Image (cartoon, coloured by chain):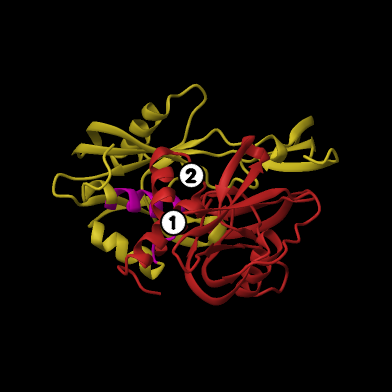
Chain colours: A red, B yellow
Amino acid sequence: MEHLQETQVDTAVAYEGHFLKVQKDTIRLPDGKTTKREYIKHPGAVVVLPVFDDGSILLERQFRYPLRQVFIEYPAGKIDPGEESLACAKRELLEETGYTATEWQFVCTIHNAIAYSDEHLDIFLARGLTAGDAKLDEGEFLETFKATLPEMLQWIREGKVSDVKTVIGTFWLDKILKGEWTL
Amino acid sequence: MEHLQETQVDTAVAYEGHFLKVQKDTIRLPDGKTTKREYIKHPGAVVVLPVFDDGSILLERQFRYPLRQVFIEYPAGKIDPGEESLACAKRELLEETGYTATEWQFVCTIHNAIAYSDEHLDIFLARGLTAGDAKLDEGEFLETFKATLPEMLQWIREGKVSDVKTVIGTFWLDKILKGEWTL
């Protein structure tokens, strides 16, 4: 794949806000010319697919300001510096929903904005759920609810579920719970 | 959903680069407190799922600098100012691959970074494909290839395909080509 490769000439922080960090690099293109690439530096995130013993799924509703809209989502959150992604998954599930889980399995890693962000999301399946008290971060507002897999698939089909981590997690659950794919 | 809603107090452009634009708004939280929200302003994008008469799929390999990695992707691109998303889909398919299509169907809209971007992607299915010459943008390097749906599903399972628009497009194609979902 060397004929497609772009290499770094120099790198600089172009913007550092309280939440977003933009990197702006000079790069060399495959044809030898140079150009600029601007992108978000992101620590990575985790997504949890919490499945109850009866096959129903734990979900969240959260207002997402960039789109001024409430989204249906799986529990998820950013990885802290030095944190393992499984530890982050357990922490986020507990903080956002109050649930703990006895069985954890890695599902897959996805890349959600490859043109302008280095973010990756590690998705985990969580089973053996026990309810407890949520501990939301300051300024974090969300509510949890349960749905079935057929409901989630229908909502994807209708466009009611459009968040990529939630769409992909649901398609994987469809394959896993049908026994077509094993982890 | 009013108990989850955040409302704008003020808005400002925090960073405007040659490619990325960061907006930084003051907002009011559901509990009445104020805080800041920083996010990328994006014009939106389209994704094309080009399917040949034999069921095979047209794909691209492209180096994505933020992750320093070649990704397997469907043809895709940003919507120009004032452009309809279907017109954008036809333009991007032609520019990136040289193909034109006689049958176009809207599949779904997805949101890929709801925490920090207002980007949406409109996905279209393209059939009745005819080959021609690609017209890549200056500084754009990619190659096209064909794969089957079972290959794509296997690559998702193995983690070889991890770009969210490509994962979601493939899961939809799986449902559509099996006849489980119709458009």
Mark 2–mark 1 Cα distance, whole angstroms, equals: 10 Å
Task: In the rendered view, tell whether residue A26 sits above or below residue A54.
Answer: above
Q: Secondary structure at mark 2?
A: loop
Q: Which residues are magenta?
A: B160-174
Q: Position of residue B37 (x, y in %)?
A: 75, 42
Label tally: 2
Q: Residues within 10 Å of mark 1 (few under 14, many from 20)?
A: many
Q: Secondary structure at mark 1?
A: helix
Q: Position of residue B180 (x, y in %)?
A: 25, 48
Question: For the point 44% across and 50% down, which residue is it?
Answer: A152
Earlier-in-chain disc, 2 versus 1: 2
Q: Is residue A138 magenta?
A: no
Q: Quadrant of residue A99?
A: bottom right
Question: For the point 60% across and 58% down, which residue is it?
Answer: A75
Q: Which residue is mark 2?
A: A161
Specify whether B178 is left or right of A8.
Answer: left
Q: Is label 2 in contact with label 1 (beta carbons under 8 Å)?
A: yes
Q: Which residue is mark 1?
A: A170
Q: Position of residue B79 (x, y in %)?
A: 48, 32
Q: State the residue lying farthest toward the front.
A: A54
Q: Quadrant of residue A1?
A: bottom left
The quarter in which the C terminus of chain A is drawn is bottom left
Can residue B132 be seen in this snapshot? no
Circle 1: residue type: Thr
Q: Is residue B166 magenta?
A: yes
Q: State the residue lying farthest toward the bottom.
A: A102
Task: In the rendered view, tell whether residue B117 sits above or below residue A81.
Answer: above
